[in-house]
């Protein structure tokens, strides 16, 4: 019961219309996703040595589109379920780390710094899923594919850093 209190706020204090909650979480997620448009892979990435398990370039856009939709829904559902502010904070942290990875890897061309960032992102994703599960199992479940993809991306980032 005490754990439940730490994870959950009084949901009655959150009376915003559902459409507004979803809109805010989608806008926040879209803002993070838009960093990818600012710092795309380009010629630098094309010239890097990549491991044999590197997926084809066309796969990244549909996978990330689906994941970003799931990230926004998970955040909105957590908020609506009355998740404690720390849970929302962890959701925001993983989103900031997500955007930072794109800047570090593609913008600064620093796979080493991006690797540190993505490991922290993986921890934040796991922390959100664990913390939100008591109040919104759906939000936690929506983060499972995200965690799996970022775990794969972490291995890919590490391999690219090692090869280059």
Image: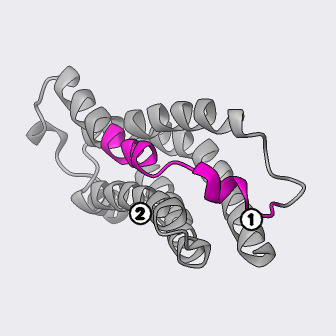
User: Magenta stretch: residue 46 in it?
Assistant: yes
**Residue 14 location, quadrant:** top left
**Residue 63 location, quadrant:** top right
Per the model, the C-alpha gap separating discs 2 and 1 is 18 Å
Helix, strand or loop status at disc 2: helix
In percent of width and height, residue 110 lies at: 55, 73
What number is the disc on residue 100? 2
In percent of width and height, residue 5 lies at: 27, 59
Callouts 2 and 1 close, C-beta under 8 Å: no
Helix, strand or loop status at disc 1: helix
Q: Earlier in the sequence, mark 2 or mark 1?
A: 2
For this view, does 72 lie left or right of residue 157? left
| Residue 135 seen in this snapshot | no
Q: Which residues are magenta?
A: 29-50
Question: Which residue appears at 22% of the width and 58% of the height?
Answer: 85
User: Magenta stretch: residue 105 in it?
Assistant: no
Q: Judge depth for marks 2 and 1 and give the one in front.
A: 2
Query: Is residue 101 depicted above or below 81 in this figure?
Result: below
In percent of width and height, residue 48 lies at: 74, 63
For this view, does 73 lie left or right of residue 120? left
The one nearer the camera, 133 or 2, is 133
Question: Which residue appears at 45% of the width and 31% of the height?
Answer: 69
In percent of width and height, residue 161 lies at: 71, 74
Question: Which residue appears at 17% of the width and 26% of the height?
Answer: 20
Disc 1: which residue: 155
Callout 1 crowding tier (Cα within 10 Å): few <14, some 14–19, many ≥20: some
The one nearer the camera, 93 or 81, is 93
Question: Which residue appears at 85% of the width and 61% of the height?
Answer: 51
Query: Is residue 135 depicted above or below 85 in this figure?
Result: above
* Residue ranking furthest to the right: 52
């Amino acid at each position: 019961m005490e754990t439940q209190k730490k994870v959950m706020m009084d949901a009655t204090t959150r009376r915003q219309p559902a459409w507004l909650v979803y809109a805010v979480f989608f806008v926040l997620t879209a803002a993070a996703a838009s960093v990818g448009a600012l710092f795309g892979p380009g010629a630098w990435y094309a010239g890097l040595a990549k491991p044999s398990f590197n997926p084809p370039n066309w796969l990244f856009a549909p996978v990330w589109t689906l994941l970003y939709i799931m990230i926004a829904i998970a955040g909105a559902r957590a908020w609506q379920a009355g998740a404690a502010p720390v849970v929302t904070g962890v959701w925001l942290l993983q989103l900031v780390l997500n955007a930072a990875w794109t800047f570090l890897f593609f913008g600064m061309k620093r796979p080493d710094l991006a690797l540190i960032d993505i490991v922290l992102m993986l921890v934040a994703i796991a922390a959100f899923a664990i913390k939100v599960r008591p109040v919104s199992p759906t939000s936690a479940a929506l983060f499972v594919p995200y965690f799996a993809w970022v775990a794969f991306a972490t291995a890919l980032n590490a391999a690219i850093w090692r090869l280059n």
